[in-house]
Each structure stands twice: as C-alpha cells, then as structure tokens.
Image (spheres, rainbow, N blue to C red):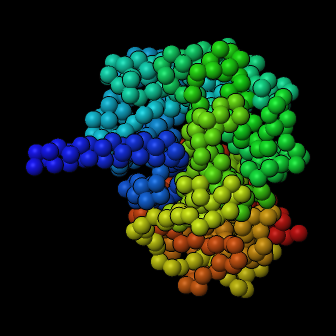
C-alpha cells in the first residue's frame, strides 16, 4: 500500500512537471497583441480580457495604465506590458516623486492584486523623426526614474523597463541587414539606452511595419512584404532574405552586434497589417500577412542572424480604433484583427496552423467576443429625394466626418464601390451611431432619415454601434486622436465631396 502510494505521488509529481513544462512551452511560442483604447465605444474591459483568453493570447501590450483594464487583467494569467505616454516623459525625467507615485499607483498595487506585469514601456516611438527631437532629452532619464522607483518597490527583478522604438532608429546604408547600425543623429543616445537594457536584462522593443514600407514606396516589391518568397530577394553574403520582416529584424540584430550588445534580446512590439483606408489595406492582404507571420515564427526557427531563437512579438492590433489620428493615413483606424465589436475580420490561426502561405487552413481560428450588446438595428441615411448639388449636403458630410469615422470611404477602400448617395449615407450613419442613435443626430437640416433596413452593400458595412451607455465626447481619446484627427477627418470629407461631384 505504501509503495503504491509512493508510486502514485511520484507519478503525480511527474505529471505536475510535465504540465508546467507544457505551459512554459506554450508561453514561449504564444503571440502577444496590442490593446489600444482610442475608441468612441470601447468594449468593457472584462469582455476584452475574456476575448484574449478565448483566443489564447498570453501577452498583452497596453499604451497607458488604465486602472479598469489592469484590474480586469487580475488573475487572468496574461503577461502585461504597461505603457507610459510620451506626454508624461518630461515629468518623470525630472525625478522627484513622480516616478515613485506612478509605480505605486500603476504597478505595485496591481502586482499585489495578481496582475502579471512584466514590462513598463516608457514612451512610445519617442525618437520618430516626425517628432523633431521633442523627446530626445527626456526618454532615457524617464526610464532611469521608473527603474529606480521599481527598485525601491522591490520589483526591478520582475518588472523590466524598456522603450518601444520605431524601426527608423536603425538602418543599413547598403540595404543589407549585416550592415545595420543605429541612426546617426541618435547613435550615442541609442548606445546609452542599449547599455541600460543590457545591464538590467530588459529587451530591445522594436515596432516593425512592412505595410508602411509598401505604403511609402510605390516601387516596393509587394511579395517581399509577405512570407511566400520574393521575386526581389536581398542577398547578404551567404544569406538570402525573402521577406522584409526577417531583413528588418536582422538589421537591428546586426546593429546590436556591431556596437557590442549582441546579448540583448529583441521583442517585436508591434507588427501587423491594416484592413481598410488604403488600396493595399484590405482583409486579404491582412490575413495573408498576419497568418504568414504567425506561421513563420511558430516553429521557433528564429531569423538568419538569430537562428533557433524564437521571435517574441505582439500583433498590432486587437481591435479597430475609430478615434486614432489619421494624419499618417486613413488606414490608422483599421489595424485590428477584430472589428470594433470584437467580431473577427478574417480567418486567422494564432497557432500557426494556417500555413506559411497565409492560407486559412483547417486549424482553430479567431473567436468572437462574447456577450456584446448592440444599439437598436437602425441606420441613418440620405433621404431618397435629396439633391446632391445642395450646399447643405456638402456641409453636412463635412460635419459628420469631422466628428465620426469616414475612413472606409475612398479609392479602393471597403466602401469605394458605393455611389455618391451611398457615400453621404455612410457619413450620416457613422455620425448617428457615434452619437448613440440620438434622433437629433439623424436630421442634418432635413436631409436624413432613420431606417430599419440595413443599407450595407457588398464590402461596405454600415455599422450598428455597441451599447456602452453615453457615447464618449466627439473627438475624445488620447492626444493622438484629438484636434489633429478631427482636422484630418474634415479634410477627408472635403476630398470625398469633390470626388462625388466630379
């Protein structure tokens, strides 16, 4: 009996070890995702956490420390990278109590409550050339302050400090990855930061966007953005790069090696493909890229300069955000693998079972958010007899698109095939839904009417908003989605009107 009991305990111990090992293996191969919150009607945090769990996400990256979101992640088993916005860097860099207070409020308490915070991301792409050096003098001191505060709190061994950087901080003068180095104007600063990362055991977080390469350069070879081989590969010594992700990743690896920091780990903080707002932003390309990427990294084979080292990455992004600034392009509001309401946009196997060719395969695909509540099935459209030449139509569209999202309208977008009246109706409905279907939001000086007949056509989807109570103030969200976003939306509306009347 005793022997049997001993054997049973031994078997149970082995089982525990195997389960733990399987869990670690699953974590090492799991992919993370960015959870942005610049929406007029965000899903409840608890709904999103369940969405993450249902789809097997073990890691999430946040752009701010929102208490409701961190609280919802309590006990979820999801590892968290929590962000600090760029507009807080100056205060944190000044030292004093600011960093201690931030850590106490946004890290220490939540860690005690069971939130698995692993990283603090200080700033977000602060060295973008378009920022004109605004954050060059505050980013590293802010990182030091947060690290010191974490040390005081006894958390520095568990919670690492890093900074997500755009891929423009490194480059290769020959376009060969092996010649990679850090950008000349910030070279010294980059080495200071990398030294800090190396000494504290934190990763270098880089945001990699093959879509932006395609969007910015009309001559960029389309097949090089994906993972099925390329007609224009980059030959670098004995290595042939057939996709831009591996080449970009290894340009960073080469830059680290060149400067004596080949030991620093790399985390891909953002990688993805948008589904609307540009001719190259569509669900087919997004599925092709994201499935190709997930399948590419699933086996843990690494990249040519780091073979056998699994790629640690966070997809960008989880859900579309209708309050993001569209200054970079109309596609900015369409990076989500899920729609605004948590429904999947296209088949995607996060286990990599879709195959490197980007096909959907037969593996498990995305699961929709559960328990989502919608407003009434009503839409706002242009009255049938309205005259498109009426100045009131133009003014109304400008007003609607200035306060709501019209980025699905335009050349080769999801609503690019609808006629002029359809364009106006889409703008009216977007505003109507943003305003929680308030009757006053479907008037437009007598031009509009509400209907219970869905006006969606083809790929052009007229949404019904989710029910979250009172809508957020128009133009709300972070600074990235504020005045600049409204101005850009108004410009978009003006361009739409010009195209309708031609």
Q: Relative to 299, is 71 on the left or the right?
A: left
Whether residue 425 appears in this view of the structure is yes
Which residue occupies 33% across, 42% down?
A: 17
Q: Position of residue 33 (x, y in %)?
A: 53, 47
Location of residue 281 (image quadrant): bottom right
Residue 500, percent from left and from top: 82, 70
Judging depth in this view, the residue of 470 and 453 nearest the camera is 453
Q: Is residue 338 above or below residue 219?
A: below
Answer with left or right where residue 2 lies relative to residue 156: left
How far from the left and from the top, in percent, is residue 131?
Answer: 68, 30
Look at the image and tell me whether residue 490 can be seen: no
Please tell me whether residue 141 is drawn above or below residue 50 in the rendered image.
Answer: above
Name, please, the residue furthest toward the left: 1
- Residue shown at 61%/24% (left/top)? 135
Residue at horizontal 49%, vertical 66%?
Answer: 368
Q: Quadrant of the C terminus?
A: bottom right
């Amino acid at each position: 009996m005793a022997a049997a009991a001993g054997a049973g305990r031994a078997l149970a111990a082995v089982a525990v070890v195997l389960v733990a090992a399987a869990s670690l293996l699953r974590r090492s191969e799991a992919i993370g995702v960015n959870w942005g919150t610049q929406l007029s009607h965000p899903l409840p945090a608890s709904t999103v956490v369940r969405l993450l769990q249902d789809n097997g996400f073990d890691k999430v990256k946040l752009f701010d420390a929102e208490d409701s979101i961190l609280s919802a992640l309590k006990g979820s088993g999801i590892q968290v990278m929590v962000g600090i916005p760029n507009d807080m860097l100056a205060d944190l860099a000044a030292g004093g109590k600011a960093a201690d207070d931030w850590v106490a409020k946004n890290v220490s308490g939540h860690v005690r409550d069971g939130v698995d915070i692993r990283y603090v991301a200080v700033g977000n792409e602060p060295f973008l050339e378009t920022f004109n050096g605004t954050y060059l003098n505050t980013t590293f001191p802010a990182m030091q302050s947060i690290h010191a505060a974490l040390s005081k709190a006894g958390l520095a061994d568990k919670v690492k400090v890093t900074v997500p950087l755009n891929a423009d901080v490194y480059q290769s003068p020959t376009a060969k990855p092996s010649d990679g180095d850090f950008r000349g104007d910030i070279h010294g600063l980059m080495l200071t930061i990398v030294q800090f990362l190396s000494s504290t055991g934190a990763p270098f977080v880089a945001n990699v966007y093959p879509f932006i390469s395609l969007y910015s350069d009309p001559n960029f070879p389309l097949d090089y953005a994906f993972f099925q081989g390329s007609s224009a590969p980059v030959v670098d010594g004995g290595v042939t790069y057939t996709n831009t992700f591996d080449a970009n990743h290894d340009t960073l690896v080469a830059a680290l090696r060149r400067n004596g920091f080949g030991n620093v780990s790399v985390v891909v903080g953002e990688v993805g493909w948008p589904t609307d707002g540009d001719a190259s932003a569509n669900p087919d390309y997004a599925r092709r890229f994201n499935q190709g990427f997930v399948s590419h990294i699933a086996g843990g084979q690494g990249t040519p300069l780091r073979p056998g080292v699994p790629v640690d990455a966070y997809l960008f992004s989880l859900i579309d955000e209708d309050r993001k600034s569209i200054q970079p392009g109309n596609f900015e509001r369409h990076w989500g693998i899920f729609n605004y309401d948590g429904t999947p946009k296209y088949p995607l196997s996060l286990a990599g079972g879709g195959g490197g060719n980007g096909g959907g395969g037969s593996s498990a695909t995305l699961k929709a958010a559960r328990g989502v509540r919608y407003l009434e099935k009503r839409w706002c459209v242009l009255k049938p007899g309205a005259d498109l030449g009426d100045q009131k139509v133009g003014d109304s569209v400008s007003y609607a698109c200035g306060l709501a999202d019209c980025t699905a309208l335009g050349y080769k977008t999801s609503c690019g095939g609808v006629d002029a009246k359809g364009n106006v109706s889409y703008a009216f409905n977007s505003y109507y839904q943003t305003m929680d279907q308030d009757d006053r939001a479907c008037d437009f000086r007598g031009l509009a009417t509400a209907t219970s007949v869905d006006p969606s056509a083809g790929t052009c989807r007229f949404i019904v908003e989710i029910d979250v109570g009172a809508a957020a103030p128009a133009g709300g969200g972070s600074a990235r989605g504020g005045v600049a976003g409204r101005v850009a939306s108004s410009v978009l509306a003006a361009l739409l009107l010009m195209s309708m009347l031609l």
